[in-house]
Image (spheres, rainbow, N blue to C red):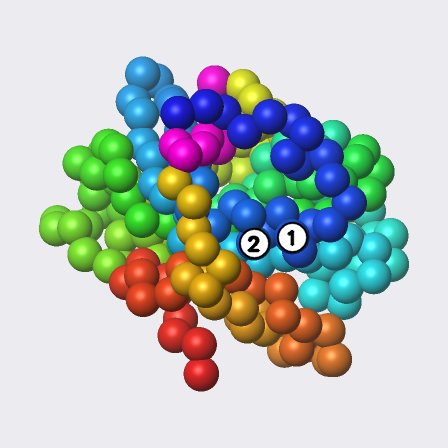
Amino acid sequence: MKKIPLSFYARKDVVQIAKELVGKIIITRFDGKITSGRIVETEAYVGLTDKASHSFGGRRTSRNEHMYAAPGTAYVYICYGLHHMMNVVTNEKNIPDAILIRAIEPLEGIDMMLKRTGKKILDKTLTRGPGNVGKALGIFKHHSGDHLLGENIYIADDGIKIPDEKIGISKRIGVESAEKDAWLPYRFYLKENKYVSRKNK
């Protein structure tokens, strides 16, 4: 299993990268504790032109500053004051394209994931939805800005290839205020995987 190289993130098409992240493995290593999961759902955000993006129109604040960082940077934001949402920055520095990791299938460190989330048993809710992904992997706002070629958070390829026909495509979830951009087909998910956050209608 190899870390995904910088060249994977440093491409122009964030939508294609979001699709290609389905099937890859996200790994965290904090205080000697390793947790990992296969990415089964992502959403792409085209920074400057996408009304659903935090950086639409060039908006730049202390909250979203890491969207403008170099490709392969983690951008973590807090949703509803509670959920720490893990995003992958792509393209190039100062072009704030990013991909939200919406769901993973847990692989390693499941006992630690259960402890972090306060759950008693492993079921589909453990890592379904971006808030649960962050909690299970131990990712918090202070990890925003970490580079994904480091040792704390990284994404790897174990050689498993997901055929195109196994990847579902839909509009994104919870971005209705983005008007017509809410309907863009920028969500990708592994069909029939129980950890995917919402069935495609």
> Which residue is tagged 2?
19
| Residue 54: image location, x then y, percent | 72, 56
Q: Residue at x 82, y 43 (%)?
A: 95
Q: Residue at x 77, y 63 (%)?
A: 50
Name the amino acid type tagged 1: Gln
61 relative position to 20: left or right? right
Per the rendered image, the range of residues in magenta is: 151-159
Q: Is residue 88 visible?
A: yes
> Which residue is tagged 1?
16
71 relative position to 48: left or right? left
| C-alpha gap between disc 1 and disc 2 | 5 Å
Q: Residue at x 31, y 49 (%)?
A: 105
Q: Is residue 114 magenta?
A: no
Label 2 neighbourhood size at 10 Å, few (<14), some (14-19), many (20+)? many
Name the amino acid type tagged 2: Lys
**Is there CB contact under 8 Å for labels 1 and 2?**
yes
Q: Residue at x 32, y 66 (%)?
A: 192
| Residue 31: image location, x then y, percent | 34, 18
